[in-house]
Image (cartoon, rainbow, N blue to C red):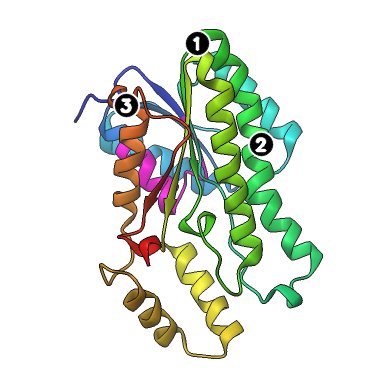
Amino acid sequence: MGTRLAGKHALITGGSRGIGQAIAEAFAAEGCTLTLNARDPDRLQQRCDAIARDHGVEVVAAPCDVTDGDAVRAMVAAVDAVRPIDVLVNNAGIHVPNRFIDYSFEQFRAVMESNVYSVFHVTQATLPGMMERRQGRVINLASSAGKWGSRNQSAYNASKHAVVGLTRCLGLEMAPYNVLVNAICPWIVDTDMATGFMEQHASVLGIGQEELAARFSAAAPLQRWIEPREVAGLAVYLASDDASYINGQAWAVDGGYTMI
């Protein structure tokens, strides 16, 4: 087991699967104590138990819907009262592809609530403790879609542009308190969420899922999707003391895709 995050305590939203799970496992492997958040309490507890067993660190479940501001404030207060939060990873989010003219307002709003307002709720609840202690890290999971435009996912792109913008603003506001705020902007990560939105994208375009997956892979300079561990490795770095002068940045993990 590594020690890069030994003595630190991280709260990770959306921590029961996908990128959040990979980050939780990578943090645990570096000695970090964890509080994981997700909506499904049973699945979340199973994930916490597995990570604690595999890595020998304390892992606590804190289930709640991060789009519910009152629930988030209660959750963060309860977590912070037991052990102060040193690192916040805002990972929870959804993806709903559609042509812009075909989005219902309810669909567009759901994406914004899950991907932007959840970051607002959790971060605003967590920052006062970090500011008082004059130390902390906030890592926001944005997307390469927060750096460019694309067809048939305007709600998702808009939400991730908002997360990148919020990251930059908070990086400036929190710097006097030694609270560093950064974003990670992955391209397509090989998770069950990606499989789901590929199916939806293919339906919007009227083509087969395999054809669409091949198109996406061919578009990337490295000719493949990202593995969750490749995102988690950057998160470990940003949470560690090695990144003590990195602030307000939006790090692309895309194999060079956004250079095209």
Q: Residues within 10 Å of mark 1 (few under 14, many from 20)?
A: some
Mark 2: which amino acid? Phe
Q: Residues within 10 Å of mark 2 (few under 14, many from 20)?
A: some
Q: Is residue 154 magenta?
A: no
Q: Which residue is mark 1?
A: 134
Percent x, y of residue 25: 33, 41
In the figure, is residue 16 to the left or right of 190? right
Residue reaching furthest left?
Answer: 1
SS at mark 3? loop
Please tell me in which quadrant of the rendered image residue 225 appears: bottom left
Which comes sooner in the sequence, label 2 or label 1?
A: 2
Quick check: can you spot residue 89? yes
Q: Which residue is mark 3?
A: 240
Q: Quadrant of the C terminus?
A: bottom left
Please state which of residues 173 and 57 is positioned toward the viewer in this rendering. Answer: 173
Residue placed at 65% from the left, 46% from the top?
Answer: 116
Q: Which residues are magenta?
A: 11-27
Which comes sooner in the sequence, label 1 or label 3?
A: 1
Q: Residues within 10 Å of mark 3 (few under 14, many from 20)?
A: some
Residue placed at 62% from the left, 33% from the top?
Answer: 122
Residue placed at 46% from the left, 70% from the top?
Answer: 195
Percent x, y of residue 165: 59, 42
Residue reaching furthest right?
Answer: 105
In the figure, is residue 17 to the left or right of 168? left
Disc 2 and disc 3: Cα gap in Å? 23 Å
Q: Is residue 28 above or below residue 153?
A: above
Percent x, y of residue 88: 49, 30
Which comes sooner in the sequence, label 2 or label 3?
A: 2
